[in-house]
Amino acid sequence: MAMTRPGLEKMMTPEPASLEMPQQDTIFAPASGAGVAGISVIRLSGPASDMVVSRLTQKALPPLRRATLRELRDEAGGLIDQAIVLRFAAGASYTGESSAEFHCHGGRAVVAAVLDVLAGQAGCRLAEPGEFTHRAFEAGRLDLAEIEALGDLLSAETELQRRQAVRGVSGALHRQAEAWRADLLRAAALIEATIDWADEDVPEAVGPEVAELLAGVRAGISRELSLSDGAERLREGFEVAILGAPNAGKSSLFNALAGREAAITSVRPGTTRDVLELRYDLAGLPVVFLDTAGLREADDEIEAIGIARATERAQAAALRLFLRSADAPPPAVEAALWQPGDLRIWTKADLGSGPGDIAISCLHGDGIGKLLERMKTDLAAQACGEGLVGHRRQRQALEDANDALVRAENALETAEAETIAEDLRAAFRGLERLIGKVGVEDVLGAVFAAFCLGK
């Protein structure tokens, strides 16, 4: 006997995928980096792809998915370059459309000539940022969570960031969401059965099984939410603020970490006026060191602005290093900025010892390795685990699903089945938003705009 309630039918039946992509422009863009290289890849996608390949090569189309050497020629028949040509059929390409790639020599003039010829083809235009990936999304080749992970992979700077992004690109979050969805479908079916067949031969004691299913899903969601802060920190990077009174050695430490004169050092107080940033790979952890203005009563308006910016960034940082030395005692504001886990660093140790968690000498490099090792341990603890949810949008969707499940659990003992069913539908909507099945139009523009032209 089939279920008849429209709410459950909608939950159990996915939206049918379109079998035909709408007719639209054929887009093209470089898919490799700018500048001179041995090979440059130019990507083409859309209904005119095969026609364009035929016109540029002036030969029969090469076989699908077989790298074939072809001469590329302009409209007058002039030779542009020899290139490897690859064709992909609709439904079996990155975008889901008929696509092609030209692997040509990487000189700027060669790439420019190929792009000029492509721009002159009927129905062809240069792609917008992220448009290839947008079309892959529309064709169902990628979900929104996988696209966000792809963006993370393209911007990954450290090994740990790469590993986290690869898990997302491989569809780990999608598979987990589908597993939760399957359990919720079973729970929803049990609840809906008590509504539709209240007078028929339906088991009455569905509550225990429903409660077990909801508890299992909520435990999995709660685990991901508990790991999401660390995953987001790892994705965005850990800011470490270097703080202290003027002449405490902040810029000297900043330069020692950079391995160059990245910041001006001077015995004159107030030399650093703005927040300087240094991106650093700390054993796979992405760290941004912040060299800040000396904390003191400012002598002028510009220095005061620098101190205000330093204080604001320091409060939001993952870790604060408070520097002090014999000639630069801790400023009074240090107590207000201090947070558990912060470190006190005694600088200029070559001139004598003093109180602090770690003593360093930027002149000789003493203690800096020990400081980095301590920071690695402390920051790794903040990024512990292998969470799949590293974006605020994803976390909000999971939080909404979790809230709906809490309501459903509470309602099992007291509420009508219709109320529980509605809470389960709300949980489904949260999971669907997580992977981009519904309610994503307001975020698509921001997501795809972060991509490069050839992606």
Image (spheres, rainbow, N blue to C red):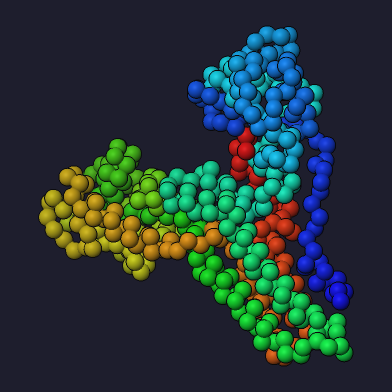
Q: Position of residue 376 (x, y in %)?
A: 33, 57
What count of labels does the image hold? 0
Q: Is residue 271 visible?
A: no
Quarter of the image with the N terminus is: bottom right
Q: Position of residue 228 (x, y in %)?
A: 52, 63
Report whether 169 appears left or right of 15.
left
Query: In front: 234, or 42?
Result: 42
Residue that appears at 82% across and 40% down: 22
Q: In which quarter of the view is residue 321 placed?
A: bottom left
Query: In front: 369, or 298?
Result: 369
Residue that appears at 13% across and 58% down: 353
Report whether 53 appears left or right of 168.
right
Q: Position of residue 395 (x, y in %)?
A: 59, 63
Residue that appears at 81% across and 46% down: 19
Q: Is residue 186 visible?
A: yes
Report whether 202 appears left or right of 272.
right
Query: In front: 324, or 147?
Result: 147
Quarter of the image with the C terminus is: top right
Residue that appears at 77% across and 88% down: 203
Q: In which quarter of the view is residue 370 placed?
A: bottom left
Q: Is residue 126 above or below residue 155?
A: above
Q: In which quarter of the view is residue 225 placed?
A: bottom right
Q: Position of residue 247 (x, y in %)?
A: 25, 49
Q: Is residue 52 above or below residue 162?
A: above
